[in-house]
Structure formats: structure tokens, C-alpha cells
Amino acid sequence: MTTAQHKIGSGFGATTTAAEVVAGIDLTGKLAVVTGGYSGIGLETTRALTGAGAHVVVPARRRETAEQALAGLANVEVDELDLGDLESVRAFAERFLASGRRIDLLITNAGVMACPETRVGPGWEAQFATNHLGHFALVNRLWPVVADGARVVVLSSRGHHNSPMRWDDVQFEHGYDKWAAYGQAKTANVLFAVRLDELGASRGVRAFALHPGGIMTPLQRHLPKAEMIERGWIDEAGNFLMQFKTPEQGAATTVWAATSPQLDGLGGLYLEDCDVAELSPEDAEGMSASGVRRYAVDREQAERLWTLSARLTGVDAW
Ligand SMILES: NC(=O)c1ccc[n+]([C@@H]2O[C@H](COP(=O)([O-])OP(=O)(O)OC[C@H]3O[C@@H](n4cnc5c(N)ncnc54)[C@H](OP(=O)(O)O)[C@@H]3O)[C@@H](O)[C@H]2O)c1
């Protein structure tokens, strides 16, 4: 069984900016946590949320870099977090819990894409571990202070079209493929939102996953120039050949998911271009189609991933 993936006609679209989404929305008194909220899409998310009056906590792997990037923004606080290190996740969560505050908007934005084979923790594949398991542990540890009625927003990607969950080799122990690993991690992000929404709904906590669009950010750091040329993203001179979103446009769907009253009563959905996405055609090849793959919003797979993630991380708020 899958979720109700149908456009709702938000009136926004691919070129909408985060500032346009949040115009007229007052977030005064609200507290947001945005992982990686100091680079690329995350930075623009932090800017839009603070601009609307929210206080934003930005857990960062590189604290000084984060402080420099966020200098000049009011109502932002930087803390330390390495999602590839479960001890770091635990320590951040404990510091936050000790502060006695509640979270209204929890945005799991940080991520790594198509890196060379890297192992973290007990030998876990780094994209699955960072993008999914670290955030799984984080949200579960923070769960006691996630406010009733809060929203959790999980950054996935159209890259999820590259791979379903590889249940027989989740950690790529039998051959590594950087795009399949990103694809699996981004599928895991969607499945996590689907299951979290089911578990949180009794407290009015709703979860969404999303594709932000294609945006040139430091996320592309692991891609050689030759590969970007081969993919048709840039030419030899580095000029963009594709229609990329600006980071301000790239943050719009995140901010819409986190704040829009248009999503009241909904949850467990995959969004793109500031709307609910349709299911993509079964016969679509690779990342050729928009929308969400059926395997990424399958409730049984979502439950199975939750069980696996809880076992691997040793954390489960339920
Ligand atoms: N840009 C796109 O076209 C695109 C498309 C689809 C989906 N997305 C998704 O959007 C999200 C944001 O991407 P972006 O383009 O804004 O990339 P970005 O500028 O590279 O930002 C990613 C952030 O994640 C942080 N991060 C990486 N590994 C971490 C770790 N182990 N612990 C803690 N933080 C870590 C990075 O910190 P450091 O700077 O310290 O490494 C950075 O702040 C990602 O989840 C990505 O998969 C992006």
C-alpha cells in the first residue's frame, strides 16, 4: 500500500523562492532545527525561517564554517553534529534536550552525494549512514521534545529513482556504486518520512519528504568535472547547460513543507516544486521522470526500514 500522492494545486511552482512561500507566515516563537543549515539549500532555508521570525538551531559538522556562513543572520544558533558518528548525534541531542526547549520544525537537510566508497561507524556505507541512519537516530533521540503538531521535513532527491532499498546488500558489501548508494539513501529518506508520519500522527506530528530540484551547491563536490560534462550539466568552460534552480528556489519546497497551511491534515507524502508529487510511471527509466517511485512510499518497506534502522542504531523512540 502506498501514500496519497496527488498534486493539490498549491499555486507555487519550480521558480517559487523560499521567501515567497513564507511571505505572510509568522513564525515568531517557533523553534526550528535545520541540519546542514549553513550551506546551499540549508542556508537559504535558515534565512527564510529566521526571516519569518523563527529561532533556528543549526547543528553543523564544521562549526566555524557554519558560524561564518550564518554571520549577520539574527536568531540563529550553531551547535556541533556529525551525522556519521552516532556518539556525536547522541551528544547533540542530549545538549538540546537539556536546554528544555521544544522543536516545532525539524528539518533533516544535511547530506552527502555520490562520494567514493567510504565506511563510517561499524563499517556502514557512508551515504546510507549519513543521509539516513544519522538522521534516524537524531529524530528518535529528539522525539521527546518534538512539539505536538510539529512538522518533520526530510530532504530526499529525485536521485531516489536510482535505487530502491537493496535489502540483500544495504551496506554495499558486494560491490559499490556511488549513484546506487545515493539512490538507496534517498529512497530511505522517503520511507523514513512515511513511517514517521504514521507513528507521529497521534500527536499531530506530520512528516514530509521532498525533492528540492537541481541546484548547484557544494553537494556536487565529489563529482569530477568530466562527469558533469558527460551528464550534460555543464560545458567545458563550466557554463550551465541545464536549468538549475537558485538556492533560494531550491529551499522553497522545504519551507513550504515546514510551514504551509495548505498541507494541514496531510503527511507521509513526497513533495516537489512546492506541491505534492504524483507517482512516477512504472516504466520510467532512471531519473527521467519526475514524481516519486512506488517503492519509496510503500508502507511495508517503510516499516521494514524502520525496524532495520532501529536495530542498527540502537535507537527507537517507539
Ligand atoms: N543540490 C541539489 O541539486 C539537490 C538535489 C536533490 C536533493 N538534494 C538534497 O538537499 C540536501 C541539501 O543539499 P545541498 O545541495 O544544500 O548540499 P550542501 O550545500 O553540500 O549542504 C549539505 C550539508 O550537509 C552537511 N553534511 C554533510 N555530511 C554531514 C555529516 N556527516 N554530518 C553533519 N552534516 C553533514 C554539510 O556539511 P559540510 O559542509 O560541513 O560538509 C552541508 O552543510 C541534501 O540532503 C541533498 O541530498 C540536493
Image (spheres, rainbow, N blue to C red):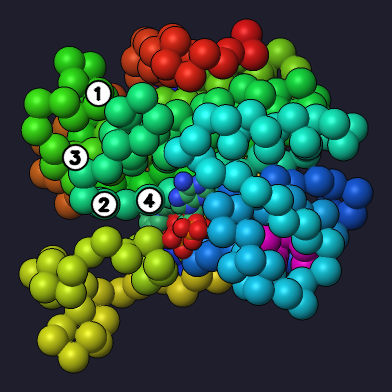
Q: Residue at image x 67%, y 33%?
A: 91
The numbered mark at residue 180 is 3
Decide which of tag 3 and tag 1 comes sooner along the chain: 1
For the N terminus, the quadrant is: top left
Task: Say which residue label 1 marks.
Answer: 170
Q: Nearer the viewer, mark 3 or mark 2?
A: 2
The numbered mark at residue 112 is 4
Looking at the image, residue 13 lies above or below residue 91:
below
Q: Which of 295 and 14 is in front in this view?
A: 295
Decide which of tag 4 and tag 1 comes sooner along the chain: 4
Q: Nearer the viewer, residue 57 or 260?
A: 57
Secondary structure of the residue carrying tag 4 is loop
Few, some or many residues within 10 Å of mark 3 (<14, 14–19, 20+): many
With 264 as the anchor, is 313 left or right in this view? left
Q: Which of 84 and 257 is in front in this view?
A: 84
Is the residue under label 2 in contact with that under label 4 (CB below 8 Å)? yes
| Residue 273 appears in the figure | no
Q: How many angstroms separate mark 4 from mark 1 (CA)?
A: 17 Å
- Main SS class of the magenta portion in the image: helix
Q: Nearer the viewer, mark 3 or mark 1?
A: 1
Q: How many angstroms separate mark 3 from mark 4 (CA)?
A: 13 Å
